[in-house]
Image: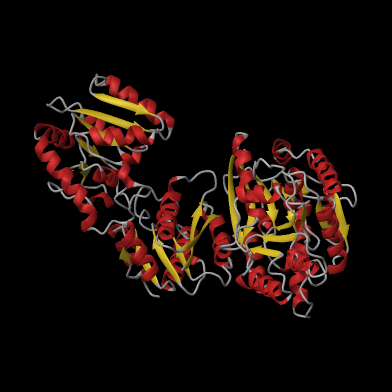
Amino acid sequence: MRILVANNAAPFVRGGAEMLAERLVRELVAEGHEAELWRLPLGSAPDQMTDSMIAASLTRLEYVDRVIGLKFPAYLVPHENKVIWLVHQLRQAYEPPPVGWVGTASLGPFIEAVHSADDAAFRRARSVYAISPVVAERLRVGNAVQAPVLLTPPHTDTAYRHEDAEGYIVALGRIGAGKRQWLAVEAMAHTRPGFRLVVAGPPDTPESAAQILRRVEQLELGDRVEVIPRFIDEDEKVDLLARCSGSVYLPIDEDSYGYVCYEAAMARKPTITATDSGGTHTLVHHGTTGLVVAPEPVALADAMAHIAANAVEAKALGERAHAAAVGLQLSWERVVEELTR
Amino acid sequence: MRIVIASTTVPTIDGGGRLIVRWTADALREAGHQVEELYLPFPTDLRLIMPALVGLRAIPLGDEVDRLVTIRWPAHVMQHPNKVAWFIHHYRQLFDLWDTEYRGIRADAEGVSYREALRMADNLGLGESRKVFTNSDTVRARVRKFNEIDAETLFPPLGGDVSRFYTDSYGDFVLYASRITPIKRQMLAVEAMQYVTTPVRLVLAGHADPEQYGREMRATVRAHGLDERVDLRLGWLPEAEKIDLLARCLAVAYLPIDEDSYGYPALEASHSAKAIVTLKDAGGALEFVRDGVEGFVTEPDPRSLAAAFDAAYSDKKDAQRMGEASARRRAELNIDWEHVVSRLTGAGS
């Protein structure tokens, strides 16, 4: 089949969704399909996004047997044989602040346009899958669409390692407001010395790295918090995970199960996440595979100190996290089979 | 500089058109720029083109982009205050092919309206660019004729590590390595082989498009009793084998009909220091090859072509001299990535 994978793009920014889309194309090609990736810039302000909706809606495809749409607005492209594997909606248009835009009267028509374009696209699609239970629930609430869940397999084939804990909690992922690394830093101010926090990942903007570094300095945590504000390669990541006591990952209402949780689990380490972190609860169950606590510094401080101080318990949580991750039965073969059905 | 290179594609169909984009992106990165490549699906059917043009023009590049470089038609209708167009060709059936048998569109009210509409779209997209480059003098002349816009020719170099090409010897065969298809006129080379008087041989290598054409070619070779003289290698030619053939051949043949630009086969010959045999109506190749300097430019008939093959075989020293001239020709025409990068990033800023 000749397949076009439709995703959005932000020039010069690459995150998990881009890697997911590229991996999907490779898997489709490996199955004998002719597959290609289309990345449509989304823009950042509502007027730019309106233009992007127009661009998607007016794109005309020839020699394409199937479109697999991942993100707004690329999946608005007209095609009679379209399958949507929804990574997420344009959440700014569906949710209250801080995810959603702070409402102004002029935003109303734009938000309405997003909803009606989405409704039409989901209705006309041959099928709609959600990448996680969280996204399926948002589809149900936002668009009255019942979408089966098709979890995203990891986009890398990394071999994870497990070693004895060396007394630090690791916070991986892009550094930015949405992932709340700052909360873990604040929490450290409420703990006694005895373990460290390592924050590692590419900052969303230079300012997001500067903010974290400034806060570490203000709290005089320089000797207990290490910030590595850059892209870390697979080897570094595997190593950081292998030797940690546990992982802390605090996104706001994450779309998917969170690769960061999955990676910690594959290294047989527990994850500390927040009650409002959304998809992370797929893998992190309080007291079983990790700890789920309120998104505030004191509760978080207790959880981090607990994991760091109780190696035997942390190891048991990590083992069960590993079993849970394997139990998701993530398989590209199955994803390709569903999306090309 | 943060540069977006945008080009259009026909998904799952168009392979070759991406090379210039990828190579340009690589060269810009090499020069220290941050580059994002955007490949945007665009239809070929005229009736689908109008809405798609509006869609392309609507694409928001956001605030992080310092320069937009557009390549394949009609990416130049995209909007950016600091846009540079590297124009490869028009919607050919409506412009340079309009007065030929290849038009394929009726010159009725609808066809004429499309022609006018696309002329206006091209004028808009090119007119608002800080600078318009073309990939050949041929296309530059067309832009002047159809759009009344002055462009600068910026010849596209061969990408990747060109040190892979080398020169081994000046052997006894003429090589024509390209997609085997009617507009490349490999058949003319086969027919020429009936008339050669020296032991010169011909190697034709490439993927036949359509496949039927490859079978016809094989039948013609057999019918003329040329099996011993013509080595027909149908199918995709591995890069290493091509480089080896280029290194050992006597000269390279490149015989397209009225091509837009000089074509990568001519550049490959140049990188292997080989003379190029081409025809007076080959189009862009004539911007690179001058008769008796970088190779032979003959009449497009089998006997004239045969005479050129014989001449190369009879005087290999002369073939070598022209081959060395073809290697020097790149520098004369500024065909190098340093020049391309400096023009694409410097102009108008």
Q: Residue at x 9, y 32 (%)?
A: B314
| Above or below, B224 relative to B120 | above
Q: From what the image shows, is residue B88 above or below residue B268?
A: below
- Decide if residue A144 is in sight here: no
Tell me if B128 is positioned left or right of A318 in this view: left
Q: The C terminus of chain B appears in which quarter of the rendering?
A: bottom left
The residue nearer to you, when weighing A225 against A79, is A225
Q: Specify whether residue B13 is in view.
A: yes
Tell which residue pokes out farthest to the bottom in this image. Answer: A105
Q: How many marks?
A: 0
- Looking at the picture, the colour scheme in use is secondary structure
> Residue B49 at x, y = what percent?
54, 58
- Near-viewer residue (A261 or B39): A261
Q: Looking at the picture, tell me which residue is in the foreground, A2 or A244.
A: A244
In the rendered image, the residue lying farthest to the right is: A287
Q: Nearer the viewer, residue B175 or B89?
A: B175
Residue B270 locus on image (x, y percent): 24, 46
Location of residue B98 in the rendering, given as x and y in whole percent from the top left corner: 38, 55
Instruction: Decide: is B300 above or below A255.
Output: above
**In the displayed structure, does residue A120 sit left or right of residue B151?**
right
Q: Quadrant of residue B228?
A: top left
Q: Residue at x 29, y 33 (%)?
A: B244
Q: Quadrant of residue A231?
A: bottom right
Q: Residue A128: where, in percent of width, then height?
A: 77, 49
Rendered residue at 87%/57% (across/down): A292
